Amino acid sequence: MALDIPLDEFEDLVAEALDEIPDELARLVDNVVFVVEDDVEPGAEPLLGLYEGVPLTERGSFYAGAMPDRITLYRRPILAICDSYDDVLDEVHITVVHEIAHHFGIDDDRLHELGYD
């Protein structure tokens, strides 16, 4: 039977994962909004999370006044790959770190090397 964690409780898990980010890194997360969606758009590639924006490593003078970057975590896909509540906690943490890494300009290949796939 698939796990079902209500949206508001899942959002709390995301907030807790963000609280676990070391302060020295959290202070560097700039102009980013975090959201939770139930699913990716119909027909879209299956994802657990998505970073949309301009990584810190690519920002220049053009970036002033830009809309916030967006990190989305997808609740149902994460729940679908987890067998227990502890698995959900781990996967939310991994996904948050993975997407923040994109904000810092770290690509999927490097994240794979680091064990965050």
Image: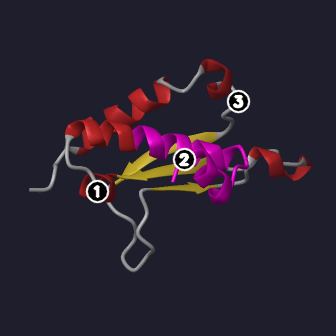
Residue 36 % position (x, y):
39, 48
Label located before the other in sequence (3 or 1): 3
Residue 46 % position (x, y):
41, 69
Residue holding disc 2? 115
**Which of the labelled discs sits on residue 28, or is there none?**
3
Residue 68 makes an appearance in the image: no
Residue in view at x 32 percent, y 36 percent:
89
Residue holding disc 1? 81
Looking at the rendering, in which quadrant would you find the N terminus?
Answer: bottom left
Taking the magenta stretch, the answer to whether it contains residue 114 is yes
Q: Rounded to the nearest whole Å, what is the CA distance between mark 3 and mark 1?
A: 30 Å
Q: Rounded to the nearest whole Å, what is the CA distance between mark 2 and mark 1?
A: 17 Å
Label located before the other in sequence (2 or 1): 1
The span shown in magenta is 92-117
Taking the magenta stretch, the answer to whether it contains residue 87 is no
Please, which residue is most extreme toward the left here?
A: 1
Please, which residue is most extreme toward the right here?
A: 61
Is 44 situated left or right of 23 in this image?
Answer: left
